[in-house]
Image (spheres, grey):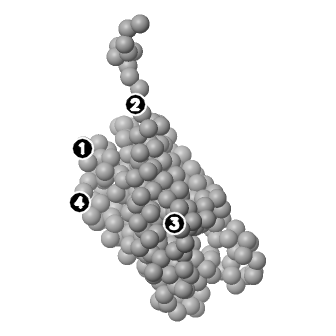
Amino acid sequence: MTATHESATGSPIAAEPQSAPGATPPRTPLVAKAAAELFGTAALVAVVVGSGIQATELTHDVGLQLLVNSLATVFGLGVLITLLGPVSGAHFNPAVTLAEWWTARRGGAGVTLREAAVYVPAQIVGAIAGAVLADAMFGEPLVKWSTHDRSAGHLLLGEVVATAGLILLIFGLARTDRLRFAPVAVASYIGAAYWFTSSTSFANPAVTIGRAFTDTFAGIAPGSVAGFIGVQLVGAVVGLALVALIFMPGRDAAEQPAV
């Protein structure tokens, strides 16, 4: 599940051009950015896991359970991106962080390698903490490995599609200077992907790890985690390739060949 910068924030933070969803204010201390990523990912996972537990306690209708879970995730993600985007870019997702670092590695806007090395562990720790917190709020065992196997091939394909679409959306918004729409757009995409992908759109390695720590509606068996993370990274590469193809920079009229 995920986010960005002025990107996944929606709150304009600078007038300078952005090539990636991450150009946060340069004076923001790295510790503040790390804290925002840890807290934001924890809150996101708490929303996902907690709403799943609540839904299963209120109804036995699986379709209604998924509807409740997806709606809570949409609202929670939109709020978190809006709140924390101006601080860290509101990635909450190692796939987004690594994709942004890759696009910015030659001096473009986005996270540096040092920032990425801090963001990713913070996101993973936050995801685990969020799952434990959700279990605690509902009186579940604080840590109980999920037994929900998600290793089938069609589910892995669903994760490739979900992650590729997320990366395409975030970086497409950045390329077209529309990052102010990221809170609504990213949250809406994740909500839709809950329903149109077979995997219910984890699209996030950190969230995948965190959800292994809870044997509830939103859980994933530890044996399925590596496969999910692997295809999520594949999806991120596919998403970046689609961004490069679809949002290919045009040539100036002076560069056009004479007729």
Circle 1 residue: 106
- Residue 81 in the image: state x and y as whole percent: 49, 58
Residue located at (26% from left, 48% from top): 105
Tell me if residue 93 comes above or below residue 136 in the rendering: above
Quarter of the image where one finds residue 84: bottom left
- Give yes or no for contact between labels 2 and 3 (Cβ–Cβ under 8 Å): no
Circle 3 residue: 156
Label 3 vs 4, first from the N-terminus: 4
Label 1 vs 3, first from the N-terminus: 1
Circle 4 residue: 114
Three-letter code for the amino acid on which mark 3 is drawn: Leu
Circle 2 residue: 249
Nearest-to-viewer mark from 3 and 4 = 3
Residue located at (54% from left, 86% from top): 147
Residue located at (41% from left, 26% from top): 250
Residue located at (52% from left, 85% from top): 146
Three-letter code for the amino acid on which mark 4 is drawn: Arg
Residue extending farthest to the top is: 259
* Circle 4 crowding by C-alpha within 10 Å: few under 14, some 14–19, many from 20: few
Label 4 vs 2, first from the N-terminus: 4
CA–CA distance between discs 2 and 3? 32 Å
